[in-house]
Amino acid sequence: MQPNVVQQAVTKPLFDPSYLSLEYIFGKILDYIQPTLNIILNPHTWSVIGIVSSLFSLIFIIIIIFCLVRMFEIQAYDKMEIKHEIHEALLRDKEKARNENQRWNYIITLVESPNESDWRMAILEADSFLEEVLREKEMTGDTVAELLESAKSNGYASIQNAWDAHIIRNKIAHEGSEYPVSQIEGRRVIKMFQNFFEELKVI
């Protein structure tokens, strides 16, 4: 092969740009995207999109309103529950305060004292408290014995405990220090008073 022929073959371009048409290429591209553009630019398409968007927006607004209403209902219910719990707690505190009789606590303090004189005083105080309670319950009688006799007709199950405790009280009151009282005996007598007071719901 001659050198000029090889040189011509090397320098000759693969295609001739004069045969290319940019209008043709863009025309082909436009042909492919034209249907999409028609859909995008079609006013009906935007009308449909607007309607669908409005429907979704309406649905979301309804859901949001429903959630807000439920949230307020739950908060209102929780507030009612809290108020109810507070009310119940206050009632329990009042009941506890009513049951924690100060005078009875004083009697328990006396009987738990290390002094024998306090054990005797605890029994005397418990009997005095018994008299007050029986009068408050509208029992009739001038003495504790008569009040207990009146209470017997009411069918109290622990009335005998009150009787036995009152008898020991009388021995302490009449015999004084000659009647021996140990702390164990003092606790036993106070327990008998307690059984009757608990039945009467005063402690």
Image: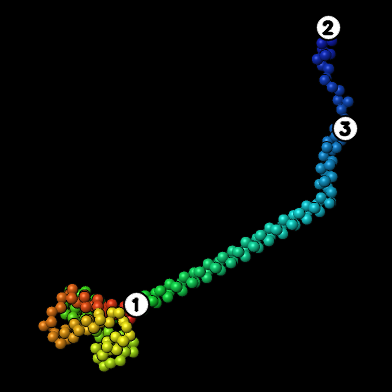
- Residue 54 visible, this angle: yes
- For the point 18% across and 82% down, the residue is 168
Label 1, secondary structure: give it: helix
> Mark 2 or 1, which is nearer the eye?
1
Q: Is the residue 154 above or below the residue 66 in the image?
A: below
- Residue 102 visible, this angle: no
Q: Could you tell me which quadrant the C terminus lies in?
A: bottom left
N-term-proximal mark, 3 vs 2? 2
Label 2, secondary structure: give it: loop
| Mark 2 surroundings: few (<14), some (14-19) or many (≥20) residues within 10 A | few
Q: Mark 2 sits on what residue?
A: 2
Q: Nearer the viewer, residue 42 or 191?
A: 191
N-term-proximal mark, 2 vs 1? 2
**Cβ atoms at labels 2 and 1 below 8 Å apart:** no
Instruction: Pinpoint residue 70: horizontal percent, then vertical percent.
Output: 60, 64
Q: Could you tell me which quadrant the N terminus lies in?
A: top right
Instruction: Pinpoint residue 61: horizontal percent, then vertical percent.
Output: 68, 60
| Mark 1 surroundings: few (<14), some (14-19) or many (≥20) residues within 10 A | some
Which quadrant would residue 136 be assigned to in this image?
Answer: bottom left
Residue 24 numbered tag: 3
Give the amino acid type for the residue marked by disc 2 in the picture. Gln
Q: Is the residue 11 above or below the residue 88 in the image?
A: above
Q: Mark 1 sits on what residue?
A: 99
**Cβ atoms at labels 3 and 2 below 8 Å apart:** no
Question: Please, which residue is most extreme toward the top here?
Answer: 1
**Cβ atoms at labels 3 and 1 below 8 Å apart:** no
- For the point 84% across and 10% down, the residue is 5
